[in-house]
Amino acid sequence: MLAFQELGGKADQGKTMMLDKGLGLNAVSDLLSVAGAHITFAKFGWGTAATSEQDVIAAKTALYARHGITTYPGGTLLEVALAAGKLTEFFTEAKALGFTGIEVSDGSTTVAPAVRAQVLSQAREAGFFVISEVGKKNPALDHALTAEDRMAQIQADLDHGAHYVLLEAREAGKNIGIYDEAGNIKKDMLAALTANGIDQLIFEAPLKAQQVALILQFGPQVNLGNIAHDEVTALETLRRGLRGDTVGRL
């Protein structure tokens, strides 16, 4: 008898970063029972980790950890802590709450290059899995960044301890980074940013069309982020060639 799990590819799947925007414990438990094997990172988006009781956050990080998933608070929360001069306290509380990763970004604030480098190094030294994010959340500021600016930041972040670099696209996936106002990929920008390979890059790709395009271009091993919790399984079918958009094309 055929086992459905035998159908579709599975080797060399890319990393998937799921965006947790405030899921409850029951929702997380249900999600993990179905799609836990397909999630690499769970990002507690923006400052959402500061809006729930500590025992709830700790219970959620523990649930994710039992499925081998790295959890981290959104970079915006670190930016707020850094601006308040509370970075050490931020790291201490993140560890106490069970977070195993840290995101370092300057999407909503301005962080001097030397400070950014120091924060990356400190996060790594503190024992966190470190992900940096390149790009601005304000479209006007983001548009001012050239491909060369982004490439230089990517390399600097990797040099200072980042395990992966996340390419900013926000939750909407439009008019930011590698995407135009309609959410289509800017091919010249993408080509420039991937000239040195994609292994340590995570593309924020909240829209299905973006996921399909990146999988078809780079293969199922491409790392994708800002995936909605209810789209994790759908993305996995795209990676495995089990959805019309990728059937017979991988």
Image (cartoon, rainbow, N blue to C red):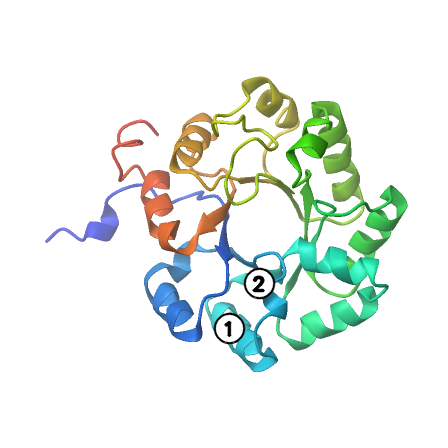
Three-letter residue code for mark 2: Thr
Q: Position of residue 215 (x, y in %)?
A: 43, 33
Locate residue 43 relative to residue 164 in the image: left or right: left
As rendered, which of 235 and 172 lies closer to the eye?
172
Which residue is pictured at 50% across the width and 59% down the height?
Answer: 21
In the rendered structure, find residue 49 and report the number of the disc placed on it.
Answer: none
Q: Position of residue 161 (x, y in %)?
A: 76, 49
As helix, strand or loop, the secondary structure at mark 2 comes to strand
Q: Which residue is mark 1?
A: 60
Instruction: List the single residue furthest toward the left.
Output: 1
- CA separation, marks 1 and 2? 9 Å
Instruction: List the single residue furthest toward the right.
Output: 114
As rendered, which of 50 and 188 lies closer to the eye?
50
Which residue is pictured at 82% across the width and 48% down the height?
Answer: 116
232 versus 69 height, above or below = above
Mark 1 and mark 2 in contact? Answer it, CB < 8 Å. Answer: yes
225 versus 28 height, above or below = above
Three-letter residue code for mark 1: Lys
> Hey, which quadrant is residue 25 in on the image?
bottom left
Q: Position of residue 216 (x, y in %)?
A: 41, 28
As helix, strand or loop, the secondary structure at mark 1 comes to helix
Q: Which residue is mark 2?
A: 71
> Hey, which quadrant is residue 170 in on the image?
top right
Instruction: List the single residue furthest toward the top.
Output: 188
Which residue is pictured at 57% across the width and 39% down the height?
Answer: 169
Graded by Cα atoms within 10 Å as few (under 14), some (14 to 19) or many (20 or more), the crowding at tag 2 reads many
